[in-house]
Image (cartoon, coloured by chain):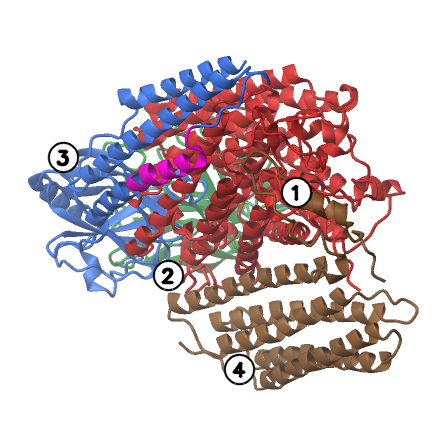
Chain colours: A green, B blue, C brown, D red
Amino acid sequence: MQTKQIFTGLVLSLVCPALTFGGTVSGKVTYTGTPAKQKTIDMSKEPSCQKQYTTPPTTETVVTGPGNVLENVVVYVSAGAPDEKSAPTQAVTFTQKGCRYLPHVLVMETGQELKVLNDDQTSHNIHPLAKINREWNKSQPPGSPPIVDKFDKEEFISVKCNIHPWMHGYFAVLKTSHYSVTGDSGTFSLPNLPPGKYTITAWQEDYGPMTQDVTITGNETKNVDFTFKAKPY
Amino acid sequence: MGKLFAVVLVVIALASAVPIVMHTWAPPVDISTHGHAIDEQLNDTMVEAGLSFLAAQILLAFFVFKSAGRTSSDEIRTFPGGARVMVIAALVLVGTEILALGVLGQKAWANVYFKPAAPDALQVQAQAGQFAFYFRYAGADGKFGTIHPDKIDEGNSNFFGLDPANDVDSRDDIVTGELAIPTNREVHLMMHAKDVGHSFYVRELRIQQDFVPGLDLSVHFTATKPGKYEIVCTQLCGLGHYNMKAYLNVLSPEDFDQWLKQKASEQ
Amino acid sequence: MATIIHPPVEPGQQDQLRTGVGSGNGSDNRLPGDGSSRSVEERPSAPVRTGIWVALAAITMMFAALTSALFVREGSANDWHHLPLPPILYLNTVMLLASSATLEAARRRVASYMRSAGVGRDAAMFWLYSTLVLGLMFATGQYIAWRQLRAEGLYLATNPNSSFFYLLTAVHLIHVLGGLGGLLRVIYKLQPNVMTLRRSTMDATSYYWHFMGILWIYLLFVLWLKI
Amino acid sequence: MSDASAPAVHHGPPTTFLRKHVFSLDHKVIGKQYYALALVAVFMGMVLSWLMRIHLVWPNSPIPGLQFLSKVGAPGGVMTPEYYLSLLTMHGTLMVFFVLTNAPFAAFGNYFLPIQIGAEDMAFPRFNMMSFWTTFVAFCLLVLAFFVPDGPPISGWTAYAPLSAVGSDAGPGLGMGQTLWGLSIFVFCIASLLGSLNFIATTLDLRTKGMTLSRMPMCTWAWFITSCIALLAFAVLLPATLLLILDRVAGTSFFIPAGLVISDKLEPHQGGSPLLWQHLFWFFGHPEVYIAILPAMGIVSHILINSLRRPLLSAKVLIYCMMTIGFLSYMVWGHHMFVSGMNPFSSLVFSFPTLLITIPATIMTLIWLGSIYGSRLRITAASLFALGFISMFVSGGVSGFFLAQPSIDIYLHATYFVVGHFHMVMGVAAIFGVFAGTYFWFPKMTGHMMSESLGKLHFWLTFIGTYCIFMPFHYLGLAGNVRRYSAFTDDFLVPLVPVHKFITYAALFTGAAQLIFLYNLIHSRFWGAPAPANPWECTSLEWTMPSPPPWDNFGGKHPVVYHDPYQYGVKSSTGDYIMQDSPEEAKVSA
């Protein structure tokens, strides 16, 4: 029995890694203290965007949810997992809508294709302030085709639009496919981890990275929680 | 062909004058207290320049009309008085024109630049950066927090590089994307350029002033008519230049106080 | 060597010129003022001589612009750190002035040598070569001055004053090297087998060289000046 | 020892192909080379303006084929805002430097100045050749900017610091492209300095026997005065661009102040002064306007006199006026900076000399007009363009009257009013001078006549067309239409778009009309009727020699000049004129 199970597991893991019943790391990202008050964005400069909001939107530097959970936190395996052989073929898309970025934090793998769309009636310029990768700055008039590009080094890249200075987002370029971004529940889960020692990193754009080590032995679920210290300003 | 030239030229000259006379594309109604002087100056100049334009073009047409096609059988006539007349005419006509306009213009210019701002003027700081204007009101304490260029973080809406953590003055500063001002109260606009050269241009205010990096300039003006007007950048500042603008919101004093309170709550 | 362009004017022609009365009212027809009724040997100016004055005017304008930029920049912000000039500059100044003197001596020798065809060439050559040597010493001296500043950690972009120091000295040095080029050309043209030197070329070269000296004094003063 | 009025370098007849057509020392070939370069530049600049006009009125619709010109600048043919600014910058730079400075001054000046003063060549033929090929290098450097990755510069032809100095942080086109722009202008300055030096020395020293200063034709005077202006103007732009380049590549801070934050990045510069660049640039920039217009004035006067068949009321006064304008042009640069944050008092100081310039300008216009009165005007393509020049000069001149006054400039600064003003007075007017010169001198330069009828057709279309383009610019300016916008999204600008549509159609039409000129030029060059020595019955020296002239102009002989250049309206053996070099006495005209 036992041996058979392991054997099938081994075979499957060789055949298609995606289906291996590996371990899972899951948890919740919270904060302590009082986070900075998010400022309302003044879009009066761009009426075509302003009129899309009933209540003026706020900045997204620190997005919190009920129960002190943190959103937009990138949690990923920063060490232990083998580097990916090849980037996934499907592209990730980054949309400019109502003079904001959707999503605010976009995770992609090195070499994975990035598509930038402009859903607005005004032209934007996309300016990833990359330091390790190549910095570029292209503007995208309404109706022009999507801008397609890729980054080949691991980096958290701050993205901005100079025409609408409040527009701000992040490209999280990772070497691994084991990542997750916390939503309004603040939870994350990294499944399909083969047995081994891993370093899990949680990165928040304002508070920076936090890491924890975890060991996976076979088919189990380890719980790892992250708690950031919030700054009032 | 010479006669044709004359006719065409007269037609062009008159046609060019029509929209001016009809005020088809005239400056918008002035809402400032100093603007009328500029408008008068503009009109006077328009009359003098317009007349000399028409006179010169029509004279050219007339002379060409008369002298085209005259052959060697016709004798050459010299303009009565010759060059001397021309020189004197230019000196007298244009000279007086220059003096008149120059002196008048000095007054209009002085209204804008040679009077210092009134001490009780509303102090507003304007910052121009690629590619938006932001405005700052001192808030309750009436003190502006100091600017720390290294702290500027537009993604976090910290456009002026304020440091509320350590700088108490800056905590109640009101930062907005539109410039709201009360009617009939002088506004002292302190101008600061964040990155490259920009300019502050409001047609209705008859105000245009460059933002020069590293140079802290200021203008002061008084608006009289409530309404929403556009502030645009007129100094080439990069790819977003054409879209760099903000709204000037002239409110009645009561509405202005309301607006200020509301903005303060949003900070 | 003189190639005469206008043959001396015959009297008849001269009269013609005098009496030539044009109609119309452009300019009055007086006797041509550019000496066309004289034979050309008396004409003082030659293109090269005029050209050099024009060139000097342009160079003056350029350095006027650069130095006024210096004064504006010095006043525009409080980041101006006055840098003490490397003392070797004063030695270089002496070199340059000395070279002016030697070149003047050379010019005189060349003139007399040209008048009395073939006598006193060696003297001329001696002064020319000593000018060349002094000029080269000036150039090396300037280079040493730069080395000293770099040793003190003062580079082109260190502060506005160092920027202007390197800029002005470099631009001046480029012009000096140009002058040395002209000097070599003169020396070449004086070689027995060439002998194509014109008096105007010699003069032009020396005017230029003297001007470089004056210009250097001015620059040195500007760089030394504290406002 | 000194050989008076011969070029410093003697050169025999060219033998090899290279010496004949490429690295020629012959001022005539060099003049033609300048003309050809200007022709290429002007058509490039024109196409750029077409693209800009089209984009302005249909900002979001693709321009077919544009994506092949620049994939990044026009994805799918839709022009990006930064590419619009690139085209704007390149248009301005090409037109001002490589057309308006080269065509009326360097091209015609090189060809005709030595001939008109009876010289066999320029004073320094080698310098002359060098100055052309240096200009060519400058041109190549500029065009190269089209092909660098982040595109051509976007800071306008005035390249205001710090935008032009901080590098690519401030946006696309401000990296390699801007540096190439700086280098190009730097090299161009050197070329122009060499050229002006040559012109001055030639005029002063190579005049033939009897050619007193007062006997020089109007255009020679204009070229001479212009070269004096250019010598001092470019001598200032040269170091200015040097400083700009150093700020860009060497990390100095001449023009970049401290504490600039560009795209959330604190720039590592300190203390520089942006106004310093503006002062240096405009100290060159304003005289540059006269470098463009004075030669045109000279050419037009020369042609006008010839077609009027009478001397001007006073050539002397006209020359003095040109000198005055040249002199004043150095005291007025500040009127470009009224709202730049100069001390407001200096604005008034700059305003007065600016207004004063209208006096000599008016005198010149009145003298032209007065000379037309009672003349025997001959209408040719050349004379039509000369008359057109006067009209344009007036139209563009009067609008200067507004901008010279600081108070009005507060409202009109940086609006289309300014664009209309300088396009008419220094753009169109100067180009009209070049057209006039071309129709007038083409027979001499090529030995073939140009088609007069095509020339006249070209004139009518261009004359009406340019008025349709540039008059509305003034109206837009009065309505406060800001210049250098790649699209009109502001509420108050949207209603003006129809006017822009009209202008765009006019521009496309007028531009197309220039193809007639191009055809006429090329066709006549090869198949035009052979030109006689003096088709226009003109009196100046260039018409005493066969068309085209031999390589040494006067065939080794040296003409003797007996008259002032404009002996028209007299009775003589030849008809109603006397050549400058004919000893014949003029009878008092009947």
Disc assigned to residue B225? 3
Give the secondary structure at mark 1. Answer: helix
Q: Is residue A17 visible?
A: yes
Q: Report which residue position mark 2 lands on.
A: B150
Per the rendering, the mark at residue C85 is: 4
Q: Secondary structure at mark 4?
A: loop
Q: Which of the 4 image quadrants contains residue D578?
A: top right
Asked if A77 appears above or below D416 in the picture, the reply is: below
Quadrant including the C terminus of chain C: bottom left
Q: Amino acid at mark 1?
A: Thr
The amino acid beneath tag 2 is Asp
Q: CA distance from mark 1 to mark 2?
A: 82 Å
Residue indicated by mark 1 = C19
In the image, is D112 to the left or to the right of D399?
A: right
Figure label count:
4
Residue D154 can be seen in this image? no
User: Does label 3 lie on the same chain as label 4?
Assistant: no
Q: Amino acid at mark 4?
A: Leu
Closer-to-camera residue (D369/D158) = D369
| Residues at marks 4 and 3, CA–CA distance in whole angstroms | 62 Å
Q: Chain of mark 4?
A: C
Chain letter for the residue marked with disc 3 in the picture: B
